[in-house]
Image (tube, grey):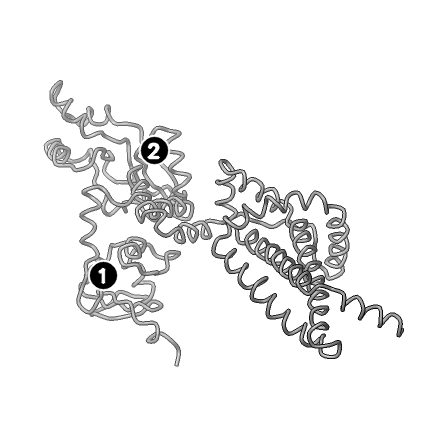
Amino acid sequence: MVGLKFTGHAYLDAANPWVLWTTLVILLLISAFFSGSETGMMSLNRYRLRHQSKKSAGARRAAKLLAKPDKLIGLILIGNNAVNILAAIIANMLAVLYVGPAAAPWVATATLTILVLVFSEVTPKSIAAQNPEWFAFKASHLLKPMLQVLSPLVWMINQLTNSLISLLGFDPNKNRDDGLDTEELKSLVDSSGHKISDNHQRMLKGILDLENVTVEDIMIPRTEVVGLDLESPIDDLMSQIFASEYSRLPVYDGDINNVVGLFQVRKGHHLLRSETLTHNAIKRFSEEPYFIPESTSLTTQLLNFQKTHRRFAIVVDEYGEVQGLVTLEDILEEIVGDFTSHAANQDHDIVVHRDGGYLIDGAATIRDINKSTGWSLPTDGPKTLNGLALEQLERMPDGNVSFRVDRYRFETEEYNTVMITKFVGVCLEVEETEEP
C-alpha cells in the first residue's frame, strides 16, 4: 500500500499541470457539445423538421437520428457521462497538486461542479434551446458517425435500460404519437404568430371547425326562408322574383314542406322574353330539390356539393319536415368570413351597447354571437339566443327579465307573445363569477 501510494504521488509530481488543465478544458468542451446536442435535438420542431428535410442535408441527418430516439439519447448520455467522469478524475489530480490529497476531493468536487454547470450544462443548453436547428444540424455531423462507431455499446446499454423499463411496468417499444387532433391543430395555428396572417389563421381554423359544425348550425331557418308559393297570384310571384336578392328560390305548393323545386331567378327574366310567366312555367323550369338531413357535418356537405354539382340544399329533420336552407356560399363563409350583402345585413343583429355590452337580436345564432364578440357561449344546445333564453327561463317571460349563462348576463329588451326579440348581453369579469 505504501508503495502504491508513493508511486501515485510520484506520478502526480511528474505530471505537467498545463497538460492536465488543457485536458480538463477539452473534456468540458466535449461535455458541452453532448449537453447542447441533447437539448437541441429534443427541442426541434418535428413538423418544421419534416418540411426542412426536403431541402437541408442537416435536417435530414437530424431526422434520421431522431427516428430512433433511444439510440440517440443512449449515445449522448454515454458520451456525456464518460467525459464527465474522466473530467472528475483530472480535476482530482489537479486538486492534489495544489491543495494536497486530504482536501483534494472536496475542492475538486466544488470546483468541477461549478465549471460543469456553467460551461458544460447551462450555457450550451441555453444556446441550444434558443437555437435548436442551428445546434442540432451542426451536431448531427459528429453524432451520426459516432453512433455508427459506438453502435454495439449503445445497443447493449439500450437492452439493459429496456429491461429495467419493462420491470417498472412501461412499454419500451411504445412509439411516440406525434399526431394532432383538430383542437391541437387549431392551437398550432394560433401559435404561428406573425408567420401566418390573421386572415389565413382564421381561414385555417374555419376549415378545421367544419367537421364539428352541422348544417343545422348555419342554415337559414324556415321562418326566414323566402320562396315561391304556387298558390300565390302570378303577379305577386313575378314581383317577388324581380325583387329577390337571391339567385335561387325554393318553389312550394301551399306549404313550405311541399317543396317541388328550386327556381333560378335569372330564368324568370328569360321566360318573360319568350313566353308569359305562369305557374306551370315556374314549376317546369325549376330544378329538382336537393334534400339533406340537419345533422350533416359541413365537411361532409361541402364534399357532397362538390360531388353532386349543387349549390343549394333544403334541410329536413328526421320526420322529413323542412327546417331551413343551406347553400355552398354559407359553408364557404364559415371558412373565409362573411362576404355577401345578406351576411352584411346580419351584422346589425349584434351591435355594441353601453357599458361594454351588446344589443343582440333574439334570432342571432350562438355561433354568430361568439364570432362577433369573442365570447364562448355553449353551442351544443339551442342554436339561437332566444332558444338559449327560453331554455334558461323555462317559460315565456311576462316582462323584461335577466338571467346568466356562465359568466354572461343577459337582459331582455323587447319581446312578443312567441319570442324574445332583443337582448342586452354583457360579459362579466372573472372575479364576479367565482364562488365565494
Q: Which residue is mark 1?
A: 420
Picture residue at 41% right of the left edge, 46% below the top: 208
At label 1, which amino acid type do we have?
A: Ile
Residue 85: where, in percent of width, then height? 71, 63
Q: Are marks 2 and 1 in contact (CB under 8 Å)?
A: no
**Label 2 crowd bin: few (<14), some (14–19), many (20+), radius 10 Å:** some
Q: Earlier in the sequence, mark 2 or mark 1?
A: 2
Distance between the alpha carbons at the discs numbered 2 and 1: 33 Å
Instruction: Give the camera-side residue of 236 and 356.
Output: 356
Picture residue at 52% right of the left edge, 39% below the top: 53
Residue 304: where, in percent of width, then height? 40, 34
Q: Which mark is residue 308?
A: none
As helix, strand or loop, the secondary structure at mark 2 comes to loop
Q: Which mark is residue 290?
A: 2
Image quadrant assignment for residue 408: bottom left
Instruction: Give the camera-side residue of 37 and 11.
Output: 11
